[in-house]
Image (cartoon, coloured by chain):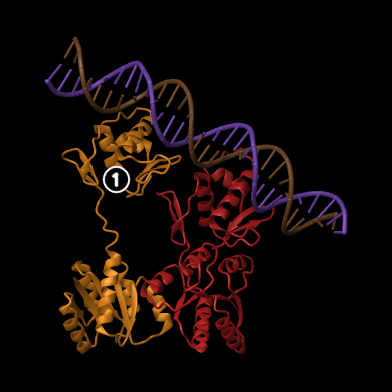
Chain colours: A red, B orange, C purple, D brown
DNA sequence: AAAATTAATCAAAAATTAATGAAAGGTTAA
DNA sequence: TTAACCTTTCATTAATTTTTGATTAATTTT
């Protein structure tokens, strides 16, 4: 297991790293939260992040907020402030646990294990909901801001899951696409939907391209 | 302040009730969670709910889940299990705070106050009130000076919130609009309503245009 | 490994749709 | 009837969306 840590107290960081290493947990500490953030952007193989709230110069909660814009990695907040509101806000922003300082490294280890165990479960709710009458599609509870053509294309794909739909079919089905438009049009629209879903085009999760045919939606 | 409590330890419940009473907090305990649930259905004047997780026969988290189907009353979970996952799940399901047992009644009081204070932030008053008989619509307490057609259009939109209404529908519904008038008429009327609401047409708050369809009212 | 095919994406043109001012045509009430 | 007000159309501008074309990247076939 590989874990990132944002902690400005280098001494503490080293003690923890030492300790967790014995239990097969590899810790990489970042003193500078911004460097940490960009590292999280690139290296996507951390299993969790331990975040110190009482950072100098920047609010740890801000870091968390920024992080959540692109990642849903498990986060354990650790803090000397045992302030209630921080705790609640932290959890609201998407932290997974809260650990008041000072704490026993053993405690941290237990929580790390607990969290990654929980993560491995598939706690799945319907991620996409189509509101036909509202012309809206909600993704993870939030509405996507789709243009009419995007809405129609995505709806059609979602309604035919796991089935590759060819471009021609989409051109004919979608009212907002002209039937004699080039099939490249579809590619562009798919690209934009993926952007709005924040999909990684190299390894898209929901909209797969089916070479020679078109696209398919995999829930 | 009036608070509901679901707690099977009657003695503890009574101690708490006694204590909180001194601070002007009236507590009503329900031993049976199901009776509590139906009470919450009927009496909607509780300011918060204190929920014991370690209930016999039923999981407190289930109660919370059921409760959340019809109410968003603030909930404080209290539990002897200081189990991590319960805490996280509880907060995910929409609890507002978590209080491990045993605790000082004072602590409970503080959290109750904190939560109801936080909750009281969005004091949602209906910003629009339609007086059908007077043919008036009040916005933030003040009457808008609307023409008959404007009144009908805005009323219809308000009465179908979050639903895009197409121009044709508005033409047919509104008595003061001729059915064979051009659909552009609607645009003009919307424009004037927005002006009277002092909406920023670039980013309207209440009347959104839904491209290709019409307009929708978002409260 | 090179060639050929297909896909992703950017930027920009073309097309569509919306916002709004101005004014014509109606309606209503004094 | 006139005046005041309202609805409707028209014209123009602005904004957004669809479509295309070009470029680069990825994948498959040769």
Front residue of A169 and B22: B22
Q: Which residue is mark 1?
A: B158
For residue A178, which quarter of the picture?
A: top right
For residue B18, which quarter of the picture?
A: bottom left
Q: Could you tell me which residue is drawn at 21 percent across and 74 percent down?
A: B3
Tell me where residue B215 appears, x and y as whole percent.
38, 41
| Figure quadrant of the N terminus of chain B | bottom left
Q: Could you tell me which residue is drawn at 38 percent across and 45 percent down?
A: B164
Rendered view: B123 above or below A80: above
Q: Viewed as shown, does residue A60 lie left or right of B13?
A: right
Tell me where residue B105 appears, x and y as whole percent.
25, 83
Q: Viewed as shown, does residue A17 lie left or right of B3?
A: right
For residue A203, which quarter of the picture?
A: bottom right
Front residue of B111 and B79: B111
Q: Could you tell me if residue B72 is visible in this image?
A: no
Q: Secondary structure at mark 1?
A: helix
Rendered view: A207 above or below C14: below
């Amino acid at each position: 297991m590989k874990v990132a840590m944002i902690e400005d107290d280098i001494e503490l960081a080293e003690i923890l790293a030492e300790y967790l290493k014995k239990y097969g947990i590899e810790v990489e500490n970042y003193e500078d939260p911004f460097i940490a953030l960009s590292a999280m952007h690139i290296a996507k193989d951390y299993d969790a992040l331990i975040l110190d709230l009482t950072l100098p110069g920047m609010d740890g909660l801000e870091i968390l907020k920024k992080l959540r814009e692109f990642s849903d990695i498990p986060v354990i907040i650790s803090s000397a402030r045992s302030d209630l509101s921080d705790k609640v806000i932290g959890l609201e922003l998407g932290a997974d646990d809260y650990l008041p300082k000072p704490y026993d490294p053993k405690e941290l280890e237990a929580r790390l294990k607990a969290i990654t165990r929980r993560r491995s479960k598939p706690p799945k709710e319907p991620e996409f909901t189509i509101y036909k009458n509202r012309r809206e599609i909600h993704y993870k509870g939030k509405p996507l801001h789709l243009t009419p053509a995007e809405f129609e294309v995505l709806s059609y794909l979602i309604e035919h899951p796991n089935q590759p739909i060819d471009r021609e079919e989409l051109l004919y089905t979608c009212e907002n696409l002209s039937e004699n438009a080039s099939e490249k049009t579809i590619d562009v629209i798919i690209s934009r939907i993926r952007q709005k879903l924040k999909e990684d085009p190299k390894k898209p999760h929901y909209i797969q391209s089916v070479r020679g045919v078109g696209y398919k939606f995999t829930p």
